[in-house]
Amino acid sequence: MANKRKKDPFKIVLIITVILGILGAGCIVGSNWIRQQRAERLQVLTDQVITENAESQAAYEQALEEFESEQEDGTNQAWPSPKGEGWEVVDLTNYPLESVSTRTINRQDALYNGMLLVNEWHSRPSDFLEDSLVSVSKATDRKISVRDNNVRLFPDAVQALQDAITDAKGANLENYVAYEGYRSWDEQNNLFQKQMEKYNNLSEEERIEKAKKSVNYPGTSEFNTGLTTRVILYKAKDNAVNSLKFFESEQGIWLYNNSWKYGIVFRFPLADYPVKGTADKSYKTGVSVQLQAFRYVGKGNAAVMHALDLCLEEYLDYLNEHPHIAVFENGALKYEIVRENVGNGDPFTVHVTTKPGVKNTVTSLDNMGYAVTVFEY
């Protein structure tokens, strides 16, 4: 039997060690390769996600920009569309106010902004104050001619009247005079008592009713608001001007036709007065005598009254039936108007919109427990 060669255990161990080393190195190399491949793949996926996110963000920003561009004037595409010609009033009663927040307002800050209704059936509120009335002459640095420095109005009414008369002068129309403005309760009472004296042969009740036909009871005169002025024409030593009937003059016709653009309306329309074709509103105003009375109501309210041919009483009735409206000029949103019940609290809270495009917000009390808020775009 041939002799078997005895194996060297150290060589075997060495071989095994070498093999294990090679395998370990291979594992390390393989592991590093796998790790590198995973890292590269992860980077590719990360870059892809970053790219997709950037594209999504860019698309979102573009869409947002397009949306805001479309909505920058406040118009909601879901609203009824205006025809796009002239001034139009769109009823939004069934559409809620958008982007709503609330605002707390003091009564004194809202009483004199234009909507205060004073007539035969609505006496001036008991908390009416004269503190902020200003002299028309002094407030305009004599740019508006007046009968005397006692002609007073609230500042917004003065500014609107000045803007209107300034533009009239730019059209070469001169000689306007603010002849009368605010009357105090005492002044109105004196006028009323003098009228009553004409009927001393009648009973007290009959005297009051007779006097009321030509002079308003104290506290119920439009001139008790501080928002109304009587305008005449006058030029010293010029009989040609001074003898003109106001609404037969270019000045009177211009003011009647254009005053609404400045937030002023003719207060007491009668049949064919002040101009031919005027509808009689005396059944609503309670005034049937011819008065050259111009009343400040604010631009948004005046635009609606002009577009719909409404006197102040009719306009407030209209808002009662249509408490949310939009006003467009040639298809562009100009005003959004909301009327809501706020009672007689002080202060009170109204709802306002914070939509893009709102340039100004004015809230006015109407003397019937409601606030009218106009958003100008």
Image: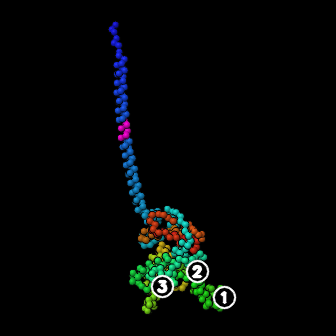
Q: Residue at x 38, y 42 (%)?
A: 42
- As drawn, 307 above or below 74: below
Mark 3 or 1 closer to N-term?
3
First in sequence, mark 2 or 1: give its number: 1
- The 10 Å Cα crowd at callout 3, few under 14, some 14 to 19, many 20 or more, is many
In which quadrant of the rendered image does the C terminus lie?
bottom left
Residue lying at the far right of the rendered structure = 203
Looking at the rendered image, the disc whose residue lies closer to the viewer, 2 or 3, is 3
Rendering coords of residue 208 (x, y %): 63, 85
Do the numbered discs 2 and 3 sit on residues whose CB atoms are within 8 Å? Answer: no
In space, the residues marked 2 and 3 are separated at their CA atoms by 24 Å
| Residue 203: assigned label | 1
Tag shown at residue 220: 2
Closest to the camera, between mark 3 and mark 1, is 3
Q: Which residue reaches farthest top? A: 1
Task: Give the mark nearer the N terminus: 2 vs 3.
Answer: 3
The quadrant the N terminus occupies is top left
Kindly tell me whether residue 314 is visible in this rendering.
no
| Residue occupying the point 47% across, 81% down | 138
Circle 2: residue type: Thr
Main SS of residues in magenta: helix
Q: Position of residue 3 (x, y in %)?
A: 33, 9
Residue ID for mark 3: 146
Label 2: element kind: loop
Q: Nearer the viewer, residue 325 or 52?
A: 52
Q: Which residues are magenta?
A: 34-40
Q: Whole-Å distance between the Cαs marked 2 and 1?
A: 22 Å
**Of the pair 287 and 62, the residue shown nearer to us:** 62
**Residue 70 in the figure: left or right of residue 341:** left
Q: Secondary structure at mark 3?
A: strand
Q: Position of residue 221 (x, y in %)?
A: 56, 81
